Amino acid sequence: MNEKKNQKKKVLILVLVLGLVLLTIGGTYAFFTYTRQGQKENTLTTGVMYFVYDELSEHPDNHINITNAFPKSDDDGKVQKGEGVFDFEVRADTAGADINYEIYLTKDEGSTLPEYVVKTYLTKVTNMAEVESETPVPDIYNNSEINLYNKLGMSKVPTLGETEGRTLYQGKVTDGQKDYSETYRYRMWIDEEANKMVNGSWKYNDMTFSVKVNVYAQNDEIDKPTIPETYKDESGANYPDLVEGLIPVYYKDGEWHKADLYKDWYDYDIQEWANAVTVTSESREQHNSDSAGSIIPITDINTMWVWIPRYEYDYQALQKLGSTPGKIDVKFIDTTKTDVTEKAEYKVHPAFTFGNDELTGIWYAKFESSTSDECNENAETCNNSDLKPKIIPNATSWRYLQNATAFAVSQEMGNDTTEYGFTGKNVDTHVSKNSEWGAVAYLSQSKYGKYGNDGEEVYINNCSNYITGIAGNTADASSSSDTCTKNTYQTRAGQKASTTGNITGVYDMNGGAWERVMGVLEDSDNPTKPILASSGFVDELGEKQIPVEKYYDLYTTSNPDSQSIELTKTACDGEICYGHALSETLGWYGDFQAFINSSYAWLARGGHYLRNTTSGLYSYGGNIGDVDISNSFRIALVSVRE
């Protein structure tokens, strides 16, 4: 019940046990019967149980607030006084039944500080000879003394209704217990790692966080809390789809660490994209069982991936930019948004439609593909579908193979339980389509990518030895062997070649090797089918083996003999290929651009380390899909739910 402001609140639970009228019945025998009805009423009077929740803090109502606060360590947070501290007491007497109770939190709707930067801590307070002491109370879901707010279990108390609650503790007052009394102290503070900067200012300036401390009680057992919501940043990006085999990671202090799914694994608002890895079979069991924060040595990693969340982009504003590179306006969306009508200002990027499936996002290989030392840089050893791809930094990119070989090894990856830990179930790995390349390029050119980080073009990989993850000293630096060892991916100089300008982005999209993508010209002799040329898509009998349509982008042309870039304006059945980084980005950064034709029917992207001034995210040209010293490939991974 509610009393006036600043008075203590009390919740009373009355448990009534009905009075009983007892009858006395005499015994009976076969030859003699005697019955007498009792003359007195034998009455059992109900016991009255009470349960009291007293708020001892000087806060109005039962709110606890964080305002004008800064990050602090757990050691400091555990002993803080004043604001951010809330005391309360639970008292009870029981007679006839147990009382079960839960302490839970509800967040004020006006809170602006993200849940994943707020720490929570509950203690029991005792006074012994006027000396106060505190004992930490682990939460009921994680059995952890200190938790991030969004890591607390979701409360199931029946009075919550549509409101979301987070369970701190569940206790019990046993039947017959008198003068039960527990004093609790709840604290919350801002995680010391929430020190992110945006444009020179602390990201969480002028934000507040307010929760209400509640207690619920009943006779029956209270349902245990359920799985908490996982971390989501404030950008609206869809949560990364972690298929079996992928381990979420973040980079800190020169090492990759296993990420906490409930903490700040990624933050697209400050150009930090979600990363995940697969690991070797020898180390997989250990890393899967290790706790968040544990180191995953780069030597244990065999593939690295970056999450590209589903988005729509302002195609009309992009058209107005013309040949002048500028910011692409991107909005993250969920799979319910599929409208691509011409009437809308925005279009859903086509990379997030995979056959009949609408995707929450795609995983994109962090680096160009490489393979084992068995590939000795020649067609005889490298054009081999028995080899296993790797996606790692500081490796020689895999070249000298046909498109069909690249496609075969990419497809097999998703079914390889031993090498990568994928199960094949709902996992599809394939050579990147051109539209998927476009999705990464557009995101990089938005406020969420390198353009939003420093406004600069993604730097070239100018390493003359085809080493993955390298950056030149400028966006169009001439080829060099010096940078192959100096400007590696983890260095500040090396990160200039990332699509984010930091270590979380995708590398090798400017320079390195040309990257063959699954984008191909329509065969005029066999409409709706691709020109296979020398791509290798034939079986042992020489019959054409065309991949399923969802694995490639098919382009049309009014002049099969020309490579004019003007033809890209009508390359999708007479219309613009929205999102493909073709006609929409003509002339950007002076990148080399030549469209595919009947002689060079397959697209390649990114340019070559030798093409210093003309390589880049928006560079493209044609090839025949055959083995080539300068052509590598990149893999995309999508999760298709049944």
Image (cartoon, rainbow, N blue to C red):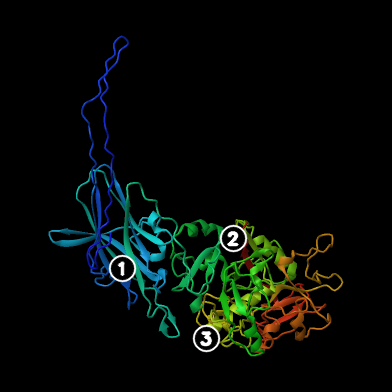
Is tag 2's residue or tag 1's residue first in the polypeptide sequence?
1
In this rendering, the answer to whether 158 lies above or below 626 is above
Query: Disc 2 or disc 1, which is closer to the eye?
Result: 1
Element on which disc 1 rests: strand
Asked if 408 appears above or below 400 in the picture, the reply is above
Within the image, what quadrant is residue 482 found in? bottom right
CA distance separating discs 3 and 1: 41 Å
- Where is residue 311 drawn, in percent x and y? 59, 74
Q: Nearer the viewer, mark 3 or mark 1?
A: 1
Say which mark, if any, is on residue 264: none
Looking at the figure, which quarter contains the N terminus? bottom left
The 10 Å Cα crowd at callout 2, few under 14, some 14 to 19, many 20 or more, is many
Q: Amino acid at mark 3?
A: Asp
Nearer-the-camera pick, 565 or 17? 17
Residue that carries the numbered disc 3 in the rendered image = 454
Tag 2: residue type? Tyr
Badge 1 density bin: few <14, some 14–19, many ≥20, Cα 10 Å: some
The residue positioned 38% from the left and 77% from the top of the image is 207
**Toward which corner of the image does residue 465 lie, by quadrant?**
bottom right
Count of picture labels? 3
Check disc 3 and report its element: helix, strand or loop: loop
Judging depth in this view, the residue of 478 and 517 nearest the camera is 517
Mark number, residue 63: 1
Q: Are marks 3 and 1 in contact (CB under 8 Å)?
A: no
Spatial distance from mark 2 to mark 1, Cα to Cα?
Answer: 49 Å
On the image, the x and y values in percent for residue 210 come to: 35, 70
- Whether residue 157 is visible, yes or no, is no
Residue extending farthest right? 525
Residue with the mark numbered 2: 420
